Amino acid sequence: MKKCIVCKIITLLGGLGALNWGLVALFDVNLVSKALGEATTASTVVYTLIGVAGLLLIVSIFKCCPCVKKSA
């Protein structure tokens, strides 16, 4: 199954977000806060990108990527 680069990035961001939440739940370690600071613009951008990626992953359950339709 082929995926376009955008789909790969969205999946990667969603996976990293899930991993971060797992670490927060199990060990009370937030990688984003440790790497970028507690309330910085950079951390806000990262959280926003991960949130958008999560929404797009939910949408991908119901709707196929247009790139896949072109190459099929």
Image: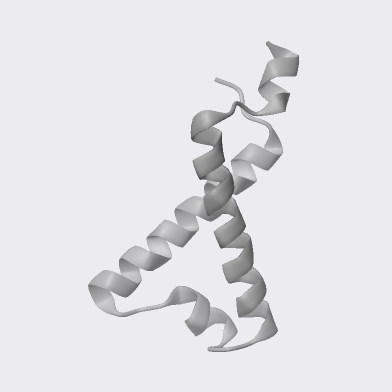
> Which residue corresponds to the image point at 35% horizontal and 79% vertical from the top-left?
29
**Residue at image x 67%, y 72%?**
45
Q: Answer with left or right where residue 34 lies relative to residue 5.
A: left
Q: What is the x, y in percent for residue 59?
A: 55, 39
Using the image, determine if residue 54 lies above or below residue 41: above
Q: Is residue 12 above or below residue 46?
A: above
- Nearer-the-camera pick, 53 or 32: 53
Q: Relative to 62, say whether 72 is above or below.
A: above
Q: How is the image coloured?
A: one colour
Residue 15: x and y in percent read 46, 52
What residue is shown at x 56% (from left), y 88% (from top)? Answer: 37
Tell me the quarter of the picture where residue 42 sits: bottom right
Q: Position of residue 46 (x, y in %)?
A: 61, 69
Question: Which residue occupies 71% across, 26% down?
Answer: 66
Q: Quadrant of the C terminus?
A: top right
Residue 43 on image: x %, y %: 61, 78
Q: Locate the N terminus and report the quarter of the image it occupies.
A: top right
Position of residue 63 relative to residue 10, above or below, is above
